[in-house]
Image: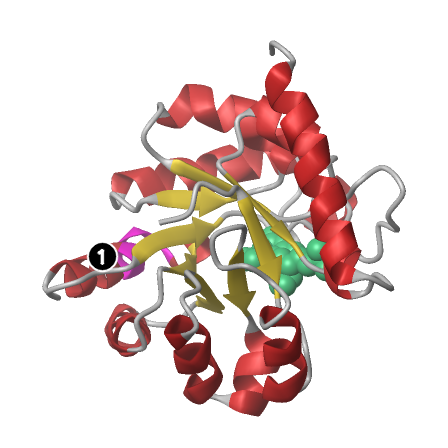
Amino acid sequence: MTETRIIVALDYASADAALTLADRLDPHRCRVKVGKELFTRAGPAVVEQLVKRGFDVFLDLKYHDIPNTVAAACAAAADLGVWMLNVHASGGVAMMQAARERLASLPRRPLLIAVTLLTSLDDDDLTAIGCPGHARERVALLAELSAEADLDGVVCSAREASDLRARLGPERLLVTPGVRPADSANGDQKRIMTPSRAIAAGADHLVIGRPITAAADPQAALSAIEAELAVGSATPR
Ligand SMILES: O=C(O)c1cc(=O)[nH]c(=O)n1[C@@H]1O[C@H](COP(=O)(O)O)[C@@H](O)[C@H]1O
């Protein structure tokens, strides 16, 4: 098991592209994430190939459906040997509990975390979808529901990490996408933070895609983020 905090989002359109990058990465220096694009194009085989190469794989399919369907999908994901998978907390406590219980019945279960509010959304977006309020409050509500369902942690933005650490205690994992080194483009992400600030705020794992995968030299981009974190860890919080 690696000590790294970095999960590289392999958001590619083919298994070849994803595995080409994976083969340039060290499974002891990062974890990898397979999301909707890669999974829809390349299927379970790419997940199995990454697992075979020694990577901890976060299968990010953000299940959101009736409890029975989500529980069965989680069991199918576990069969692929993934390290972690996610569901949407807005699917409700019964859905999250069904998923957790199904995984608990397996001999080897992956970590199960809940997406709170997508990092591409802000307060204005909440109003637009008919849920007016602050992103921070909605994240807190959904995170507490996921804790009620006894999930292993949440996906949130690093901006909510310190608040959630106080609310959820030290055990729940805080997995934060929307991480942007200072010189990276935000793209479609709205609730963002730099890698070192995200860790200082209490994030356990940083999900980072385009700042690495779209860089001219992805390994160099990963090394620069590792260097930023190494400097940050030497600095008292
Ligand atoms: O669950 C996720 O991984 C996720 C949740 C969320 O709220 N925001 C978010 O960006 N993600 C994923 O994290 C990755 C972020 O990629 P970049 O924006 O390229 O760094 C993408 O693969 C997203 O699908």
State the SS at label 1.
helix
| Residue, far top | 236
Depth order, front residue of 74/235: 235
Percent x, y of residue 218:
76, 61
Does the magenta portion include 70?
no
Write the residue at 80% across / 57% down: 188
Percent x, y of residue 229:
65, 31
For disc 1, the marked residue is: 100
Percent x, y of residue 168:
37, 27
Residue 56 visible from this viewpoint: yes
Percent x, y of residue 156:
55, 42
Write the residue at 68% across / 78% down: 12
The quarter of the rendered structure image containing the C terminus is top right
Above or below, comparing residue 213 to residue 151 in the picture = below
Depth order, front residue of 24/197: 24
Ligand 1 is found in the corner quadrant, namely bottom right
Write the residue at 27% across / 68% down: 67
Depth order, front residue of 166/9: 9
Above or below, comparing residue 4 to residue 51 in the picture = above
Q: Which residues are magenta?
A: 92-96
* Quarter of the view holding residue 206: top right
Q: Amino acid at mark 1?
A: Arg
* Quarter of the view holding residue 176: top right
Residue 129 visible from this viewpoint: no
Does the magenta portion include 94?
yes
Give left or right: position of 143 versus 80: right
